[in-house]
């Protein structure tokens, strides 16, 4: 067996059904080894960013490693921006970098970097280059295992072409870990946390990415009910996963500094989230120092990173929540009246959240030029418990997050914390391949579409039925909003350099890829979105022309 065949055997043993890549000639031995094999299936992407984001999406929805192969130094460089997205959001992807033969590496060879690993070190949790034929299997399995070892995140392995071609003999594959790799929080700290929660006047749970990654939404709902605690999602700047059902009575909205429920809280229980990813230097603390913070996270680096905690719980969100439930069983006895009164207050916050959502949706009626809110309104009527929405629309992401329902852990994915444009379209392909029974919609801005456009080729080639909705405001609205915040000469003159990206007909471009495409130019045509989506077994593209003068939310 040659090295290239061993790679495919290992991926198959790890139950990886698809892997993604944009090959060059260095990949020839691997491509040749695919002949007469059906698993794993290689998904050809015509740009490396599509390949990386597709692997990212596949990993998020399956929990298995998402695998991407990148070509030499040039392909690696092209994929790094979306590797950053995966790193920040904790997506378990394995980047296999197929590099030139070992004899060329020191000879300034074609497409050879001085140090391929150095290119990715800050975006990966582990990196290695295979040095010998005999170490290939062990090294590759280590890379796979480490990517799903908490805290999850990208790993890198460089494999020289001559090792792909070499006869490595018989191989022994260990396969995926047979045990849970998460650690358990300390029982001492669990007891301290439970005691603080018992005495809390108004606890607030921030349900974060780790809740989704461990698929423990049900446990967090039980905790909220037992504790009579309000629950919010993460701040929109690091909201990448659907981590609590918005329709459940304890959900009160997204975390934000002026939220009444945050002001009310005296104890904050942060579950599997980051506190926080800041866009600008804060004018005041996001969590008042008078509030006690209990932070449960599998990554010890996150605990106390910015805000000191009263109790730090290092380990599995699932184990930590289950242990808290057990402790609170006893500690909350005799407090039923207090809990009932708190439930009334929480229900008021929940109803206020639902009212804000309805008022926003209802406020968009006969409005021209078309506003983003009309798209949100149409989506609200379209999505259901089987819909997965991928948001990559930057300035339009906020109303999507704030005013659309989310029912389960697969309802929503984004890369708000990474911010590399074009992520959503590739991610949508990986998510649909990983979870084909879901209806997958990708909402992206025109700026992001320009970066993510090559994904249309992959979607058509493999008949991946994703609905792509492009919000076209003809501008880099986030940059315009930045100029408005800056209040300099551009603000005074009403002229915003570097923001106008008008001129392209994206519907025609999508048709050029063979994708069934529609254009919405007015409010009267908005129903095209609902009529088009989910009806075909092929990708669908809808371009919606929105108000080019509307930059969205000005403040970050």
Image (tube, helix red, strand yellow):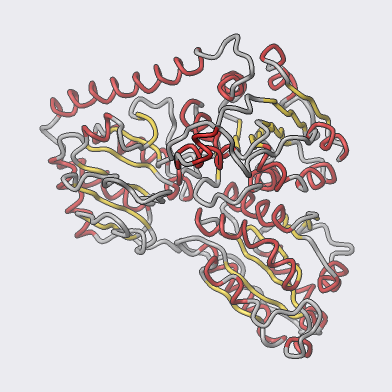
Residue 223: which quarter of the image? top left
Q: Is residue 180 left or right of residue 163?
A: left
Residue 386 vertical position relative to residue 236 in the rendered view, above or below: above
Residue 434 vertical position relative to residue 180 in the rendered view, above or below: above
Residue 146 vertical position relative to residue 414 in the rendered view, above or below: below
Q: Position of residue 394 (x, y in %)?
A: 56, 40
Q: Is residue 426 left or right of residue 374?
A: right
Q: Say if residue 471 shows up in the picture.
A: no
The C terminus is located in which quarter? top left
Q: Position of residue 372 (x, y in %)?
A: 58, 25
Q: Say if residue 415 shows up in the picture.
A: yes
Q: Residue at x 18, y 39 (%)?
A: 266
Q: Nearer the viewer, residue 359 or 346?
A: 359
Q: Residue at x 53, y 59 (%)?
A: 87
Q: Residue at x 47, y 41 (%)?
A: 488
The N terminus is located in which quarter? bottom right
Residue 379 vertical position relative to residue 43 in the rendered view, above or below: above
- Identity of the residue furthest to the top in this view: 366
Q: Residue at x 21, y 58 (%)?
A: 189
Number of callouts in the render? 0
Residue 260: which quarter of the image? top left
Q: Position of residue 419 (x, y in %)?
A: 55, 49
């Amino acid at each position: 067996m040659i090295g290239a065949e061993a790679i495919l055997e290992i991926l198959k043993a790890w139950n990886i059904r698809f892997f993604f890549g944009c090959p060059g000639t260095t990949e020839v031995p691997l491509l040749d080894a695919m002949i007469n094999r059906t698993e794993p299936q290689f998904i050809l992407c015509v740009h490396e960013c599509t390949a990386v984001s597709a692997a990212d999406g596949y990993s998020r929805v399956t929990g298995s490693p998402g695998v991407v192969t990148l070509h030499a130094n040039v392909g690696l460089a092209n994929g790094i921006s979306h590797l950053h997205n995966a790193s920040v959001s904790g997506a378990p992807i394995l980047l296999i970098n197929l590099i030139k033969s070992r004899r060329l590496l020191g000879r300034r060879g074609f497409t050879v970097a001085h140090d391929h690993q150095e290119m990715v070190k800050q975006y990966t949790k582990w990196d290695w280059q295979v040095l010998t034929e005999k170490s290939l299997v062990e090294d590759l399995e280590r890379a796979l295992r480490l990517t799903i070892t908490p805290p999850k995140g990208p790993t890198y392995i460089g494999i020289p072409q001559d090792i792909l071609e070499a006869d490595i003999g018989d191989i022994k594959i260990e396969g995926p870990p047979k045990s849970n790799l998460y650690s358990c929080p300390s029982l001492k700290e669990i007891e301290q946390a439970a005691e603080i929660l018992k005495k809390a006047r108004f606890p607030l749970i921030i349900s974060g990415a780790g809740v989704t990654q461990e698929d423990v939404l049900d446990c967090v709902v039980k905790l909220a009910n037992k504790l009579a605690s309000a629950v919010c999602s993460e701040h929109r700047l690091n909201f990448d996963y659907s981590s609590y059902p918005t329709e459940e009575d304890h959900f009160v909205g997204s975390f934000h500094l002026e939220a009444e429920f945050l002001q009310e809280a005296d104890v904050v229980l942060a579950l599997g989230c980051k506190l926080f990813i800041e866009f600008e230097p804060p004018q005041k603390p996001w969590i008042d120092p008078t509030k006690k913070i209990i932070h449960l996270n599998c990554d010890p680096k996150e605990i106390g990173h910015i805000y000191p905690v009263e109790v730090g719980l290092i380990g599995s969100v699932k184990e930590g929540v289950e242990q808290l439930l057990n402790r609170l069983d006893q500690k909350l006895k005799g407090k039923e009246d207090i809990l009932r009164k708190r439930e009334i207050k929480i229900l008021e916050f929940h109803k206020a959240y639902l009212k804000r959502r309805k008022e926003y949706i209802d406020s968009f009626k006969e409005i021209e030029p078309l506003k983003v809110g009309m798209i949100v309104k149409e989506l609200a009527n379209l999505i259901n418990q089987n819909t997965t929405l991928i948001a990559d629309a930057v300035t339009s992401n906020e109303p999507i997050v704030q005013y659309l329902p989310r029912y389960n852990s697969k309802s929503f994915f984004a890369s708000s914390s990474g911010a590399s444009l074009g992520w959503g379209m590739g991610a949508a392909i990986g998510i649909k391949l990983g979870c084909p029974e879901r209806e997958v919609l990708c909402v992206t801005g025109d700026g992001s579409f320009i970066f993510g456009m090559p994904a249309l080729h992959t979607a058509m080639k493999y008949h991946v039925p994703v609905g792509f909705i492009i919000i076209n405001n003809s501008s880099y609205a986030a940059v315009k909003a930045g100029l408005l915040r800056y209040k300099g000469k551009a603000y005074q003159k009403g002229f915003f350099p570097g923001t106008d990206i008008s001129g392209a007909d994206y519907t025609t471009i999508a048709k050029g890829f063979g994708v069934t495409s529609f254009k919405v130019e007015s409010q009267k045509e908005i129903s095209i979105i609902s009529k088009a989506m989910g009806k075909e077994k092929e990708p669908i593209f809808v371009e919606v022309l929105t108000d080019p003068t509307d930059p969205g939310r000005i403040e970050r």
